[in-house]
Amino acid sequence: MAGQRQAIDNINRLVKNGAPNKALQAAYNKLLEAVQKGNEKAIEKAVEVAVNEKSRYVAERITRTEMARAWADGFIAKMKTDADIVAVKFKLSSRHPVFDICDMYAKADMYGLGAGIYPKDKLPPLPVHPHCLYRYVEVIEGEVDMQQQRDQVREASDKWLNSLPESRRVQVLGRKGLKAWEDGKDWRKYMRGYAGLREAESRLSGIKLQLHAGKKSNE
């Protein structure tokens, strides 16, 4: 009986926190129902379905994340060779499902160029997290005054955090991080998913170098 209660508790946690799509959540719910009824055959079938749905979800997550990374490689390779591109805008997808650090990247004016606009050598990494749906957008010379560029990363994000209700701050900082930030600590030590702003590198550059070296060798 105690083992059954423990199993039910574990599945309940999975349904709440470990089922990021409807198919997987439905599979966990079926498993929960089967365990509660104590039907051994139903449990066996529900476990099989849940495992298959979990595997499908993981495969989809890897595919979507790698597609985002490949798209970023192409964008960065083009950006580095196009002198007309002077900055990059961080743009959220209309399907952005969860409030997180991506909202900060899109809304905070960290370099005095406008909300979500970054110098080419100070970009948020892409993808920021698995299933990441944001993208870079070119900012062409004349669209922004690069003379206004200044590092105000901490101050701009402090302002953004101050504009949020406490529940949103907790989502991006966590309870301990929120307390530390309210005590004057730098948000960069606590922001979930923050990996710094830096010059982005494209994997295509390495491929081009290898191809160029191969061509020289053949010659």
Image (cartoon, rainbow, N blue to C red):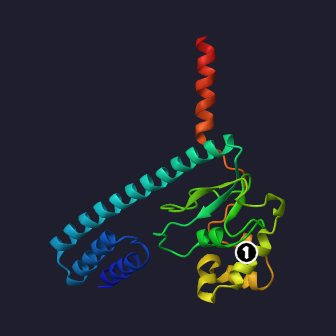
Q: Position of residue 77 (x, y in %)?
A: 62, 42
Q: Position of residue 150 (x, y in %)?
A: 83, 64
Say which residue appears at 64% left-offset and 85% top-offset: 164
Residue placed under numbered mark 1 in the picture: 157
Say which residue appears at 79% left-offset and 58% top-offset: 146
Q: Position of residue 52 (x, y in %)?
A: 28, 60
Dot 1: what SS? helix
In the image, residue 45 above or below residue 197: below
Residue 24's image quarter?
bottom left
Image quarter in which the N terminus is found: bottom left
Out of 44 and 76, give the one closest to the viewer: 76
Q: Amino acid at mark 1?
A: Ser
In the image, residue 82 above or below residue 6: above
Q: Is residue 197 visible?
A: no
Residue 209's image quarter?
top right
Say which residue appears at 64% left-offset and 61% top-offset: 89
Question: Of all residues shown, which one is farthest toward the top?
Answer: 219
Label 1 neighbour load within 10 Å: few <14, some 14-19, many 20+: many
